[in-house]
Image (cartoon, grey):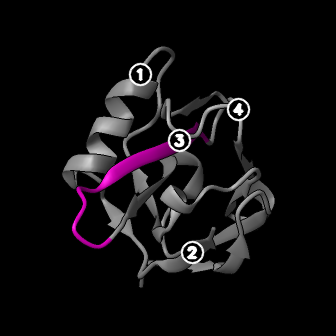
Amino acid sequence: EVQLVESGGGLVQAGGSLRLSCAASGFEFDDYGMGWFRQAPGKEREGVSCISSSDGNTYYADSVRGRFTISIDNAKSTVYLQMDSLKPEDTAVYYCAAGPPLGFGAGSAFLDLLRNGGMDYWGKGTPVTVSS
């Protein structure tokens, strides 16, 4: 059974930090690109960040670049999202997802897939609330 289980969300003040984790199981983790997308009430889904499980290449949406850091531990089949300098507009439910292998230069396309529901697997999400 495929599972992606997110954790680490919560309530934080603006300027604060959170670290999200996503534990994956039930599929060949190394064969997939991994990413995070978020959805806030009344807003469109947004692809936030992605990472290649084979070479660690990363890509970020403009809205989070410089504040968020994605990382991966292949031995634990776990993806992380370190979120610093959080803003109220970062408030959303954050989802982890697995999709096609992330090739060089394909980060923007992968974020599009995250936004458009083109992933193979995804978790149930973890809520993040940033207060002003």
Q: Residue furthest front?
A: 132
What segment carries the magenta color?
41-52
User: Whole-percent x and y of residue 50?
Assistant: 53, 41
- In the displayed structure, does residue 48 sit left or right of residue 120? right
The crowding category of the residue bearing disc 2, from other C-alpha atoms within 10 Å (few below 14, some 14 to 19, many at least 20), is many
The residue labelled by disc 4 is 66
Label 1 belongs to which residue?
106
Badge number at residue 128: 2
| 44 to the left or right of 10 | left
Which disc, if any, is residue 50?
3
Which is nearer the N-term, disc 4 or disc 3?
3
Q: Amino acid at mark 1?
A: Ala
Residue type at mark 3 is Cys
Q: Is residue 43 magenta?
A: yes
Look at the numbered disc 3 and give the secondary structure of its residue: strand
Q: Is residue 47 above or below residue 102?
A: below
